[in-house]
Amino acid sequence: MKRALAVLLLLATGIAHAHKPSDSYLTLHADGQSLRGQWDIALRDLEFAIGLDGDGDGAITWGELKAKQAEIDAYALARLALRADGRPCRLEPTEHLVDEHTDGAYAVLRFAAQCEIAAYRAVEVEYSLFFDLDPTHRGLLRVEHGGSSTTGVLGPERPRLEVRAEGRSRLAQFLDYAREGVWHIWIGFDHILFLLSLLLPAVFVARGGEWQPAERFGETVWDVFRVATSFTIAHSITLSLAALSVVQLPSRLVESAIALSVVLAALNNLWPLVHGRRWLVAFGFGLIHGFGFASVLADLGLPQSALLLALVGFNLGVEGGQLAIIAIFLPFAFALRATWLYRRAIFLGGSAAIALVAMIWLIERAFDVRLGLI
Amino acid sequence: MTYNASSGERLTGPPLLPVGPATGGILEKLSADLRLRDNLLFYIACSVIRTITAGLLLALAFTEASAAPFLPKSDAVVLERLPTRPNDPTAVELRALRAALAAAPTDSDAAVALAERYFELAVAEGDPRYVGYAEAALRPWRSDDAPVDVLYLRGLLRQYRHDFEGALKDLELTLKQEPSHTGAHSWRAAIFMVRAEYAAAARECAALSGNASELRATGCIAYVEATTGKTREAFARLTGALERHPESDADTKLWILTRLAEMAWRMQDYEAADKLFRRALALGVDDNFLLAAYSDFLLERGRAKEVVAMLKAWTRSDTLLLRLAMAEKTLGLREADAHIQALGDRFAAASLRGERLHMGEEARFLLDLKGDARQALAVGLENWKEQREPRDALVVLEAAAAAQDAGAAAPVLRWLRDSGFESARLKQLADTLR
């Protein structure tokens, strides 16, 4: 869907395709037992090599491409050799599609490799497409194996590449992403301060226009639970929207908005506009924090074959980090909730300090300056 | 929340595990709250469930997001328009040249003729695939003792792909066989100018003065002088030479008028610069450099509308699409977003291949269109290692100023001081940074 939209957008704005040197995109899925691949080859290059324009009108149609499909398969697959643990594999085409890259339309050839071997540990790729016609052609290789991927560029100087079939174990990957989630929370002082701003009043209830200590720890936990759940749901929504590229916000705007959310959450403790509905605040600002998470995930890169693993791992890591903060903070806060130390110094003083720090962040991020105060 | 007035018990909300009454004293409070552990465990359990659900939803979203190839709806759908039709004079000519080479594969003249034609197309269209085809034609002659025409063309092809070391070497070999080869001297001078090796460039220009036309020779040396602090004299000298040779070919005139326009611009004679740019355009030769230089001029002078009109049809070229997007962004036009996206994709495609030939453009893109000064500075400095033209210096200094990192701009500031390059804009930036 996204690709179709992108194409429509390109056509609507009339952007011509770019000029770039010749590349093909070769993706292999190697799981240690089966081996299959997808090869995107530019129509421009195929036209130069074997000729596709049947009626000579300067345009290549789907019909013309289909008519030449067998010839394309034979030509391309003859110039690609795959070996699993040294044993040559027979490549069989399975599907034919089309895709768009920055410089035009590509024929997409999906194939299965029959290697006559039950299990293998390494795959060797030997590539020689178009090198005789255009030595600037490159095969851009990506091998997906066990949830992670290895990339390489195949050229006339370096036509061979060997990749191990087994990647990291699923558990190791899961832990990798969980660790990233925890790490992101620990180093994300803005997220921590936002969380603290929402936690500080959790041990109170609003009664008679004033904060009163909560009667039961249970209601504190319930309050924190509602707030944290709204936050999680909200950031998952915006994380999805950012992932789908439905909404793309500039990072400066997002970072500034996150700083603003911390300021407002902290100020709300000092001048409560929202007391019983803090979960709404958490939801509203959770939407913004989601965009912040999206950029972290984009930097990490997500493996298409272990997506669920990675995302659940990352989320559990984030949750775990938050939980650690809550578990440390909440019992003590609850115990101290009626004391002057908590009510004045920690709650009011702390909220004011958080608001101040966040205000400095806001100025730094919004105006792209470095105040150097913290 | 509603509470029972007498017992203080909460009336709404799901019944949680009952909690004991609060008592005085901190430690007593903690230990008396026997359900503390149970409440926390409940909370942890709910957190895990909530998180897994969120993860599932996200995974669903992400699988939608991964771009997929598609099946066209019907046989008549046009997938790609080729650059030439089979009956085009260009296509016919290329077929003839290819046939001639196929008939005599060891004939270097036939190979050079074909490769030259491909190279001309590469320059005219800005299409690097043609350079690949040209290189393929010249492949049998890879050694250092190839015929002089092959060596020269190989140098040009290498320079197009920014292999400046290789290009200089091939052109040097050309000169060994033919010391008065004017093309080789001109191109070596041009490459030395890109690398800011001005003494070497001046030497090549001096070699031209005996052999090439007065205009070409003057153009060469004037360009070096204008870049090393003698802008006014160079301008006068070159203007005189141009007036004395109205018969020269369009390509030479184009190059000279573009250089003169840039000089006038730097001397802040904006009317003269505009006139010179227009004269160059009026020659009717499509030239990427001219359009890019004039666009930069118009953008600086606040004439973004004219840039949009001029570059609308040039989206194929990365350098021109960049300037078009910059103009559209300045004017707040809707098309800017799609163009910015396309540029990002193109730079990503280049880095995937491992060949980032347009890092100067990429730095400008990051600075002006993405607002990422730090990344722009990093890319700009990486670019500066290979390309040291004034344009490349400008983007580094502007990025350094925006990122407030004067230290990083040191190599460019050093160049500015050592070369004596005259530019009010660069000088202002340098003063801000020092």
Image (cartoon, coloured by chain):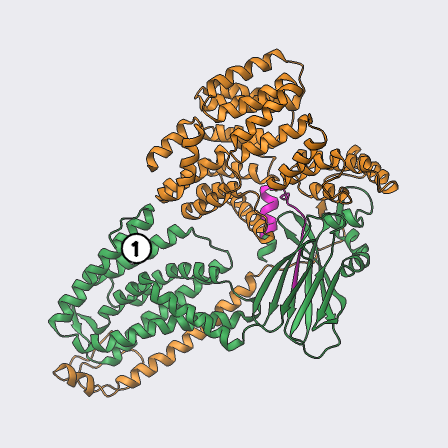
- Quadrant holding the N terminus of chain B: bottom left
Q: Magenta span has A15?
A: yes
Q: Badge 1: how crowded within 10 Å, few (<14), some, or many (20+)? A: many
Specify the segment rendered in magenta: A6-27
Q: Hey, what amino acid is under mark 1?
A: Leu
Q: Magenta span has A185?
A: no
Q: Looking at this view, is B393 or A70 the one in front?
A: B393
Where disc 1 sits, the SS reads helix
- Whether residue A205 appears in this view of the structure is yes
- Given the current orientation, which residue lies at the most extreme top position? B244
Residue that appears at 17% across and 83% down: B29
In this picture, is A343 found above or below B211?
below
Q: Report the chain shown in green.
A: A
Residue that appears at 14% across and 75% down: A338
Q: Looking at this view, is B290 or A234 the one in front?
A: B290
Residue A281 place in picture, x, y as percent: 31, 63
- Given the current orientation, which residue lies at the most extreme right position? B103
Residue A20 place in picture, x, y as percent: 64, 45
Residue that appears at 57% across and 56% down: A2
Residue B281 place in picture, x, y as percent: 60, 23
